[in-house]
Amino acid sequence: MKKKIFLLFTVLAIVIASVFLGCGQKENQVSGVKIVSTIFPQYDFARAITGDKGSLKMLIPPGGEAHTYEPTPQDIISIQEADVFLYIGGESDAWVDNILDSVDTSKTKVVKLIDYVDTLQEETVEGMQEEKHSDEDDNEPETDEHIWTSPKNAIKMVNAISDAICQADSQNDKYYKENTKDYVSKLEELDKSFSEIVKNGKRNEIIFGDRFPLIYFTKEYGLKYYAAFPGCASETEPSASTIAFLTDKVKEDKIPVVFKIELSSSAVADTIAGETGAKVLTFYSCHNLTKDQFNNGETYLSMMTDNLAVLKTALN
């Protein structure tokens, strides 16, 4: 059924594109290298690299949910007409492969970013609510797709994006490379700051009363974690035993903070905090942001900088 839907989208896209071309409309033409990304992290990385020389589009809008996103015909046209198309390549991007198989991207630099890092499997740690699977295949371990949560991975992603942009617009490659160098130095400083906070912390354990899309982050800095759900969990109601386990952990280990992630309910974290006296703070996975944050110029770097402060509070 899903394949039929994708094919329908593709047909609609081709029809619409033909109408645009036939009528000779030019209002959608833009200057600069045209870059389309699926979600915020790679959009923001490309924005830092291109500065004022790029035209960027993010398919999943601010506040949108990547796990339930379905492309529109205009989205498909945007992918086909892009100079550079950026996507992560995890389970949430399964729809992308169907699109790429159906449209002409011979003039598009397609960058599957998960290919540029060492991947990790989603895991279910002690106390975590396990996902309910209806299909046998769903019991297979899934690759965790939240690769950008490690600043070191972000550096690898930025370099891959920069290479593609430089190839697509070689006349401005010097400008892009300078921007890349500057941005990578900021990511290196961010990585150093996280390492220092963890090194100087009184504890190395964090608690999330929420989904946990931060395996790459915790593995990078040697942090131990407990959470209500895995990173891509569709569940929103943890069992009583999961809440009890996390509550006991906070009490026993004297954890001062219970985290939630952005664009998520704080209900579970609030329940645990109410029983323990811990603070509820937001830790940004940077998967997406609100419309207001987007309009106010929030970036991957600004949100990760906010994470520095809350992590320091949680570890001390």
Image: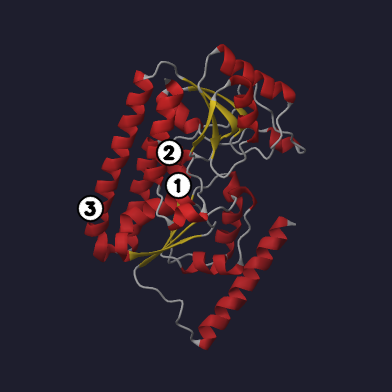
Q: Nearer the viewer, residue 277 or 240?
A: 277
15 to 190, vertically: above or below: below
- Find numbered disc 2 in the image and state the secondary structure of the residue it sits on: loop
Cα distance between the residues tagged 3 and 1: 21 Å
Type of amino acid at the residue the image marks with label 1: Leu
Viewed as shown, does residue 292 lie left or right of 165?
right
- Find numbered disc 1 in the image and state the secondary structure of the residue it sits on: helix
Query: Which residue is tagged 1?
Result: 113
Q: Which mark is residue 290?
A: none
Say whether disc 3 or disc 1 marks the residue closer to the N-terminus.
1
Cα distance between the residues tagged 1 and 2: 8 Å
| The N terminus: image quadrant | bottom right
Q: Are marks 3 and 2 in contact (CB under 8 Å)?
A: no
Q: Which mark is residue 178?
A: 3
Residue 148 horizontal/vertical position (percent): 44, 41
- Find numbered disc 3 in the image and state the secondary structure of the residue it sits on: helix
Residue 302 horizontal/vertical position (percent): 38, 44
Type of amino acid at the residue the image marks with label 2: Val
Judging from the image, the colouring scheme is secondary structure
Q: Please give the name of the residue rendered at 62% of the width and 48% of the height, measured from the top-left corner.
A: 67
Viewed as shown, does residue 68 lie left or right of 282?
right
Q: Which mark is residue 117?
A: 2
Q: In the image, which is nearer the foreground, mark 3 or mark 2?
A: 3
Viewed as shown, does residue 186 lie left or right of 157?
left
| The C terminus: image quadrant | top left
Q: Can residue 153 be seen from the camera position used here?
A: no
